[in-house]
Image (spheres, rainbow, N blue to C red):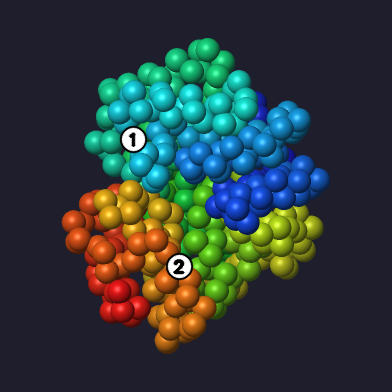
């Protein structure tokens, strides 16, 4: 395993880290399995945005007796309320959520306290003036968090936060579909490593400024959405029209300025090991230049990444999972029996949607969720 400096924090983190998506699998038993693999393979960094108390408790148990082996990035403002995830800026809820998290993780400190999911400048202003940032600073002064982070999908908001000097670590979504403009005909020059040592080319200008500013100011980037919610690995779902490999996606993310670690989501030990195998991949296996050369202009706006930021739903519909099942039917041009049965097993279904639209105001990608719920109701019948 190779290690990188996380900005100016002084932390040395593994290039491959763990996302928390799979920790709740197998009735939360997957958490320990993934941590066992992580320790064996030298993976020392993980993110925990999930607020489910059972997930947090499973992680706490998985770290028992080996807390010093891991660098924890966990979130401030991600709480569990009425059986659902909720993002909050209410300072009393933020504080209570943090205390619960620390208790469940069985630790006195976390290395990176990440202010959770800020994609709006007004929200950032609320974080700065409403007490959340002050609370994070208090925690740092007390030694309960070592560094202050922020998670965001919006480069304009992230840049505002980075330039303010308030954060030391940025959790940001990076993959070729977010970043790229149409490919240059001069492929070898476009993706040559030396061309990334200074000003980046063929990047969205706001993202370009963000990555370069992080590099310049010593703000370390931890990467989420490296695989585009898994879509980039599936030829049917990839906007490229072909499946990219995990190695290509990871290498692309690790090639961006200021990036220290890719948080690889995994729902099984096999998936996690596939990401870790990047460390032993050949240069040819990592190379993404030829695959990217044929990419059209790409925009993920309107595409669900199953991140669950749309939650909570007032009718307790698991919107991300319903959308995932809907997309499976679209990809397969029908309703497979397994998908139908999985949909049936959900506690709440698309037909219960009251079309309030609150979920759409939270979605980082502008997904037309109400329309998707209507489609799902029509597809599954309820």
Residue 381 at x, y percent in the picture: 31, 79
Q: Is residue 154 left or right of residue 59?
A: left
Residue 55 in picture, x, y percent from top left: 55, 43
Q: Quadrant of residue 80?
A: top left
> Can you tell which mark lies on residue 345?
2
Q: Is residue 226 left or right of residue 123?
A: right
Q: Is residue 177 left or right of residue 7?
A: left
Q: Residues within 10 Å of mark 2 (few under 14, many from 20)?
A: few
- The mark nearer the N terminus, 2 or 1, is 1
Q: Which residue is mark 1?
A: 88
Compared to residue 334, the image places residue 25 above or below, namely: above
Within 10 Å of the Cα at label 1, are there few (<14), some (14-19), or many (20+) other Cα atoms? some
x and y percentages locating residue 285 in the rendered image: 71, 67
Indicate the quadrant where residue 283 lies: bottom right
Given this view, does label 2 or label 1 mark the residue nearer the observer?
A: 2
Q: Is residue 291 visible?
A: yes
For the residues labelled 2 and 1, the Cα–Cα distance comes to 29 Å
Whether residue 202 appears in this view of the structure is no
Q: Residue at x 71, y 58 (%)?
A: 269
Q: Is residue 228 above or below residue 47?
A: below
Q: Give the residue drawn at x 57%, y 51%.
A: 24
- For the residue pair 19 and 316, the one nearer the viewer reads as 316
């Amino acid at each position: 395993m190779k290690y990188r400096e996380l900005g100016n924090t002084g932390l040395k983190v593994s290039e491959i880290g763990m996302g928390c998506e799979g920790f709740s699998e197998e009735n939360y038993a997957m958490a320990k399995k993934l941590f066992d693999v992580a320790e064996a393979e030298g993976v020392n960094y993980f993110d925990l945005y999930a607020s489910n108390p059972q997930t947090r408790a499973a992680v706490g148990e998985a770290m028992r007796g080996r807390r010093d082996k891991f660098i924890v990035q966990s979130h401030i403002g991600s709480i569990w309320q009425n059986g659902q995830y909720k993002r909050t800026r209410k300072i009393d809820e933020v504080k209570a959520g943090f205390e619960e998290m620390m208790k469940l993780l069985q630790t006195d400190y976390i290395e990176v306290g990440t202010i959770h999911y800020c994609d709006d400048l007004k929200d950032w202003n609320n974080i700065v003036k409403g007490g959340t940032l002050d609370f994070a600073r208090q925690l740092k002064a007390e030694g309960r968090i070592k560094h202050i982070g922020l998670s965001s999908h919006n480069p304009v908001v992230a840049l505002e936060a980075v330039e303010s000097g308030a954060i030391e670590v940025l959790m940001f979504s990076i993959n070729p579909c977010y970043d790229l403009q149409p490919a240059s005909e001069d492929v070898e020059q476009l993706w040559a490593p030396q061309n990334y040592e200074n000003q980046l080319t063929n990047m969205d200008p706001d993202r370009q400024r963000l990555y370069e500013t992080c590099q310049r100011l010593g703000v370390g980037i931890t990467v989420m959405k490296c695989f585009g919610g898994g879509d980039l690995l599936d030829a049917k779902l990839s906007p490229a029209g072909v499946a990219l490999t995990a190695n290509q996606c990871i290498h692309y993310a690790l090639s961006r300025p200021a990036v220290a670690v890719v948080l690889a989501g995994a729902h099984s030990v096999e998936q996690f090991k596939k990401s870790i195998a990047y460390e032993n991949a050949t240069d040819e296996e990592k190379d993404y230049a030829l695959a990217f050369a044929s990419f059209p202009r790409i925009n993920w706006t309107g595409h669900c990444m199953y991140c669950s930021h749309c939650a909570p739903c007032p009718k307790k519909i698991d919107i991300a999972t319903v959308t995932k099942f809907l997309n499976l039917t679209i990809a397969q041009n029908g309703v497979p029996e397994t998908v139908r049965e999985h949909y049936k097993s959900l506690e709440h279904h698309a037909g219960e949607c009251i079309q309030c639209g609150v979920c759409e105001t939270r979605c980082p990608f502008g997904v037309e969720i109400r329309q998707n719920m209507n489609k799902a109701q029509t597809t599954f019948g309820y």
